[in-house]
Amino acid sequence: MLETYTKEQLDLKDYFEVIYEANVYQEEMYSDREGFSHWRVINPKKVKLEHKQRNNLQFFPYTKEQLLRAGKPDYLERNQSYMHLVQYLTRNYEMDKEEADEIVEECVYATLIGDELGEVIDYLSKVIELESMESVQQLTDYVVNLMNNTKQWFLKGFSPIEIREKSESELHPLVKAKKNSPIPTENKKVGRNEPCPCGSGKKYKKCCGR
């Protein structure tokens, strides 16, 4: 990618020196047999395996500007669905925007490491008081929207929504929301024994349907 954007041949020694110096300063990466990973990546081997199982899916075509933004320390994409959940928390619970932002940030990272909807809701139930089933449902709808619009490591930088828009014939199953949800998300029904639409080659029940 560097050679593509700079239109120059990369000196590998220079590259590793820059990576090393950047990490000494920012302390945001670690290295192992799988290469360099952000410190939040718990299982880089699993991420790479998921990539290999999606051979029909190319990596998200990030622009040079997007990569430069993402390279800033503590960068996190705060898209519309992210801000909607932050606003919901500040409106309905006694917290300021900074506190709400920290909570939603953890929801995003939970999504990135592969946590399911129930696990994210369980985390939220420990940091905010859910007084009724109605409040649980409302919160769930916002979380579903957040997860479906979060660019994910396992999906090569795409969000489930982007993959759905990319190819209606090869849908990645979106996180399901209950009917009459204020933030509706459509989903194509997939049989548990059918090939998983994410392109992994596994049966749905052994992949995204777990």
Image (cartoon, rainbow, N blue to C red):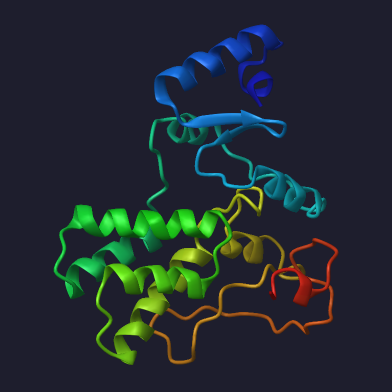
Q: Residue at x 49, y 14 (%)?
A: 21
Residue 105 drawn above or below residue 125: above
Apparent side of residue 108 relative to residue 4 in the rendered image (left or right): left
Residue 71 drawn above or below residue 191: above
**Count of numbered badges drawn on the protein:** 0
Apparent side of residue 151 relative to residue 76 in the rendered image (left or right): right
Please identify the quarter of the rendering in which residue 93 is found: bottom left
Q: Where is residue 127 drawn, in percent x and y? A: 29, 67
Apparent side of residue 121 relative to residue 12 in the rendered image (left or right): left
Residue 202 drawn above or below residue 176: above
| Along the line of sight, the residue nearer the viewer: 33 or 60 | 33
Q: Where is residue 184 drawn, in percent x and y? A: 47, 81
Q: Residue at x 68, y 19 (%)?
A: 3
| Along the line of sight, the residue nearer the viewer: 39 or 8 | 39
Residue 169 drawn above or below residue 37: below
Q: Residue at x 43, y 33 (%)?
A: 69
Q: Where is residue 158 drawn, in percent x and y? A: 61, 53
Q: Where is residue 173 drawn, in percent x and y? A: 66, 72
Q: Residue at x 67, y 15 (%)?
A: 7
| Along the line of sight, the residue nearer the viewer: 80 or 103 | 103
